[in-house]
Image (spheres, helix red, strand yellow):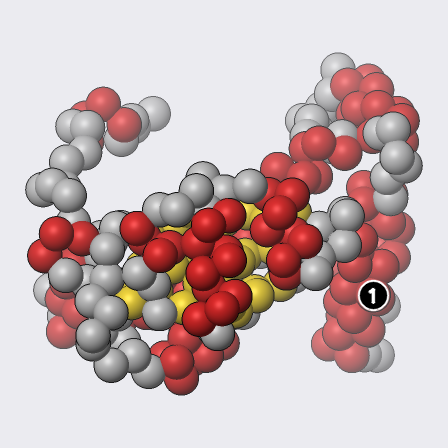
Amino acid sequence: MSESNDFFNDLVHSRRSVRKYDQASEFDHAAVARSLELAILSPNSSNMQLWEFHRVISSEQRNKLADICMGQNAAKTANELIAFVVTPYKWKPRAQMNATQIRQAFNGREDATAKRALKYYEKLIPFVYNNDRFGLFGLGRKIISHCIGFRKPMVREVSKNDLRVCLHKSSSLAAMTFMMGMRAEGYDTCPMEGFDSKRAKKLLGLPKKAEITMIVSCGKRIEEGIYSDRHRVDSQDVIISH
């Protein structure tokens, strides 16, 4: 095993969800900034990057958000809290950004690959991401997908709710990259889903259409911050070969 593999192996094994942090320990907020820069590089659906990372740094705001996080120790003792947010309403400028990049990358080419790439961002993405309040557009896409699926393999997850799930998947990948980055910096994290989403959105000044995937706390672990030895189900129960 190479040194880089050894490092990653140690990183994965040392990362834990820490429920209590050492508030007396010095904390480098620049480590959060560096880890978020890495999170931006995370894989995401169609490179749409429909996410935002909201840092809650001041003690006053952290205390307010900790209360919104149901008073969890992981939030109350954190040096910083980061909300991972999805922004589906930003799909148009993101699609235009990607189309522009594709045009530059395939400049002068008229082959099938170039045409297909442009068609993806200029026609398919608008078709999938354009949703009305009641999800009727998504229902129409669902019917079309079902009909095409009789003849050939077809993506079935095309409704408004399916898109919502897709965006939260991408946001979760970014959160994982961030947590690994923080561990590499020598700090610990805890992803939290237990919070009052309505109050959290108000505190962060988020628009109605934004959604919080999770809130991640950061700090330096103390012994009682890890409640027990790590345990997982047997790999044979979840790793299945076909």
Closer to the camera in the image, 180 or 145: 180
Label 1 sits on what residue type? Answer: Pro
Rendering quarter of residue 133: top right
Residue at the (59%, 51%) spot, across then down = 200
Residue at the (90%, 36%) spot, across then down = 132
**Dot 1 corresponds to which residue?**
93
Closer to the camera in the image, 113 or 2: 2
Residue 69 lies, with reference to residue 9, above or below; the image says above
The x and y percentages for residue 156 are 69, 27
Q: Is mark 1 on a helix, strand or loop?
A: helix
Residue at the (79%, 24%) spot, across then down = 142
Q: In this view, does 92 lie to the left or right of 54?
A: right
In which quadrant will I find the N terminus? bottom left
Q: Is residue 215 left or right of residue 17?
A: right
In which quadrant will I find the C terminus? top left
The x and y percentages for residue 118 are 82, 61
